[in-house]
Image: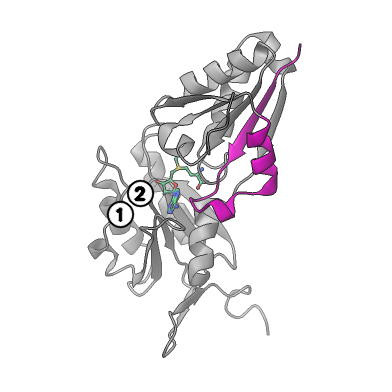
Amino acid sequence: MSGRLAVIGLGPGDARYLTREAEDALASADAVYGYSAYLDRVPSRPGQARHGSDNREEPARAAAALRHAAEGANVAVVSGGDPGVFAMAAAVCEQIEAGPPGWRALDVQIVPGITAMLAVAARVGAPLGHDFCAISLSDNLKPWDLIERRLAAAAAAGFVIALYNPASRARPGQIGKALTLLRRHLPAATAIIFGRAVSRPDEQLTITTLEDAGRVPADMATLIIVGSRDTRVIYREDEAPLVYTPRAVAGAMA
Ligand SMILES: C[S@@+](CC[C@H](N)C(=O)[O-])C[C@H]1O[C@@H](n2cnc3c(N)ncnc32)[C@H](O)[C@@H]1O
């Protein structure tokens, strides 16, 4: 019997962001594995087993799901946002590469979801309208000095930067250090967006500048978009501002 493993993106929170493909994959699973907070978003179904675990247990969760699939089950692993963005799809691939040969024979499907960066961007306009990159500020799996070098290089190269994992209880100070570094490479007036719990009932959006960004709280439910020198804010009388990055860099459309 050959098993099947689907790594499913749940989107940023609101059930309306769940794709039809994700709904179908969840409905057909014998068992669902995930970080407990994400598993809570999946309606329970009769006969479907649920295996919740802590968010720091990704390798163990991926291995348990693979073992289960290798027994012939149809297994789902859920991730917030997109499973391929700082999430479980890479954890599953790491385990397949390091694990027993039988895991390579499994039917593995990655089901995409709307990542936080896109959900936040859509709330405020089109800040990702030109070249951009995404950087995780977590130094759990890479050294902080590498994060600093990547931030400096991205800012200097003119990328808009989406910052995932800007802070946690164990890492409250890193966003402050990152902002200090970015101020060395970008003008004080650079637009910055803080999107917290986007598409959830406690959603908060703040549009500010690099100069004032230190006053905005950030936690592990926050995604920050740091504009480039080209990013603009359109202020409107009765509507929220629109933040966008023009498709062409200044001077390129003569
Ligand atoms: C471990 S990463 C997982 C990213 C996820 N796979 C995705 O594609 O959005 C967790 C980070 O994603 C961001 N995030 C996830 N959901 C969010 C939401 N609804 N609103 C704002 N940021 C969110 C935050 O930066 C958080 O610290």
Mark 1–mark 2 distance (CA, rounded to whole Å): 7 Å
Horizontal relation, residue 85 to residue 173: left or right: right
Q: Is residue 107 magenta?
A: no
- Name the foreground residue: 51 vs 56: 51
Residue extending furthest toward the bottom: 237
**Residue stretch in magenta:** 1-28
- In percent of the image, x 76 and y 11: which residue is there? 1
- In percent of the image, x 35 and y 58: which residue is there? 202
State the quadrant of the C terminus: bottom right
Identify residue type, mark 1: Ala
Q: Does 36 sit above or below residue 12? A: above
Which x, y percent locates residue 141? 41, 31
Q: Does 239 sit above or below residue 76? A: below
Q: Is residue 20 magenta?
A: yes
Which residue in the structure is indicated by mark 2?
166
- In percent of the image, x 67 and y 36: which residue is there? 25
- Name the foreground residue: 191 vs 54: 54
**For the residues bearing labels 1 and 2, Cβ distance under 8 angstroms:** yes
Identify residue type, mark 2: Pro
Which residue in the structure is indicated by mark 1?
218
How is colour applied across the structure in the image?
one colour
